Image: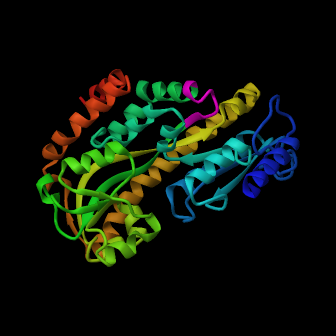
């Protein structure tokens, strides 16, 4: 109760200081110094992610948002960046966005399944995308626009997807080499909580297991779980590949992950056309920056993992067709259950 009251008060205080904007706004301030070397900002935006590492792609993306927005607005909009300092759990960031203590946050789509938007779990389907190029083509095209419409409509405009960021591509890593689905039979694997994710690993014969991310290194080291799955950069930074149960890496490339750059739709609609144009330009720039860092760090992280002595089975040596054969029926069922066959068809057509 005290925590929620504090958030409410924070939202009231920030909204109360807003100047120069036609509507109410989360985390708006009329007192921060802008990017023109001294002009008073009409509006202060707070952008936040749950990642504390300064080398995280989100960090680069948010810094670019601040740089570009303060420049194109001539200091009329200033930006405060929070890198894990508003909360390291995404649920905390979403709450702050709803309460008005943040203007924009980076979050996984999955939380929306619990607030009446089950369609976003399409992003959790394995082998939905074949490459980073395919992912970009879909998210920056008709499919991405449709998902934005769904989220706006089903959340009552409480959430507006400003753009799509990436968290790279996820791979298997564990106590033994894996080349085919059969190699996973009987193995425990720490994976995401999404039901479609768990259905996939069960279809491979593995046993999905829940382990907190912060406890996974110890779980791998002590043999509590046989394996896990994540992107190179994430498990490299946590040194999971240095454990006995994490040193074998297989480039399954099963999940080209999507993250959402979110803002309140009500707040955005209350901005002037000029403010919207400035923010849109900054969003385009920071999205480009974040993705470029993701792709660069994918290569650099793999090199670091190899240098540390991990054993990597390259994508070309994996039975990808075998894994996809298990994933496609799960995709079809999800699409049928959630009236998303047309959206799935768009994605598959873009791969051709």
Q: Quadrant of the C terminus?
A: top left
Residue nearest the observer in this picture, 68 or 313: 313
Q: Quadrant of residue 233?
A: bottom left
Answer whether residue 317 is magenta in the image.
no
Is there any visible trace of residue 36 in the rendered image?
A: no
In the figure, is residue 188 to the left or right of 41? left
Q: What is the x, y in percent for residue 61?
A: 56, 51
Query: Seen in the image, is 183 located left or right of residue 208?
Result: left
How far across and down, in percent of the image, does residue 67 sit? 67, 50
- Taking depth in this image into account, of 152 and 272 the one nearest to the observer is 152
Residue 22 in the image: x percent, y percent? 82, 28
Left-right relation of 90 to 344 = right
The foreground one among 256 and 126 is: 126
Q: Residue at x 72, y 33 (%)?
A: 267
Residue drawn at x 17%, y 53% is 205
Residue 336 in sight here: yes
Range of magenta residues: 153-162
State the image coordinates of residue 298 (x, y, percent, origin top left): 37, 58
Residue for point 61% across, 34% down: 159
Q: Quadrant of the N terminus?
A: bottom right
Q: Is residue 168 above or below residue 85?
A: above
């Amino acid at each position: 109760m005290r925590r929620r009251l504090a958030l409410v008060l924070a939202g009231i205080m920030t909204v109360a200081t807003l100047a120069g904007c036609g509507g109410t706004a989360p985390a708006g301030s009329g007192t921060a110094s802008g990017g023109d070397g001294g002009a008073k900002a009409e509006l202060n935006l707070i952008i936040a992610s749950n990642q504390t590492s300064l080398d995280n792609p989100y960090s680069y993306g948010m810094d670019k948002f601040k740089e570009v927005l303060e420049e194109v607005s001539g200091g009329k909009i200033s930006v405060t960046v929070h890198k894990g300092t508003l909360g390291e759990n995404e649920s905390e960031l979403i709450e702050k966005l709803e309460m008005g203590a943040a203007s924009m946050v980076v979050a996984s789509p999955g939380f929306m399944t619990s607030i009446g938007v089950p369609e976003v779990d399409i992003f959790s389907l394995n082998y939905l995308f074949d490459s980073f190029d395919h992912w970009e083509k879909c998210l920056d095209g008709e499919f991405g626009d449709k998902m934005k419409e769904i989220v706006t409509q089903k959340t009552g405009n409480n959430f507006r997807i400003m753009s799509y960021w990436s968290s790279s591509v996820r791979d298997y890593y564990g106590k033994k080499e894996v080349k085919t689905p059969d190699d996973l039979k009987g193995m425990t694997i720490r994976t995401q909580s999404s039901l479609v994710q768990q259905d996939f690993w069960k279809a491979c014969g593995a046993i999905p297991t829940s382990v907190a991310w912060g406890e996974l290194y110890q779980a791998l080291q002590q043999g509590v779980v046989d394996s896990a799955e994540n992107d190179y950069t994430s498990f490299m930074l946590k040194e999971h590949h240095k454990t006995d149960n994490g040193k074998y890496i297989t480039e399954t490339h099963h999940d080209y992950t999507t993250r959402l750059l979110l803002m309140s739709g009500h707040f955005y609609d209350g901005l002037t056309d000029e403010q919207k144009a400035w923010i849109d330009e900054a969003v385009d720039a920071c999205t480009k920056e974040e993705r470029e860092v993701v792709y660069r760090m994918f290569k650099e992280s793999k090199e670091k993992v190899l240098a540390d002595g991990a054993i990597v089975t390259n994508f070309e040596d994996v039975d990808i067709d075998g894994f996809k054969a298990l994933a496609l029926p799960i995709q079809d069922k999800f699409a049928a259950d959630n009236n998303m066959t047309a959206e799935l068809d768009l994605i598959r057509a873009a791969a051709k």
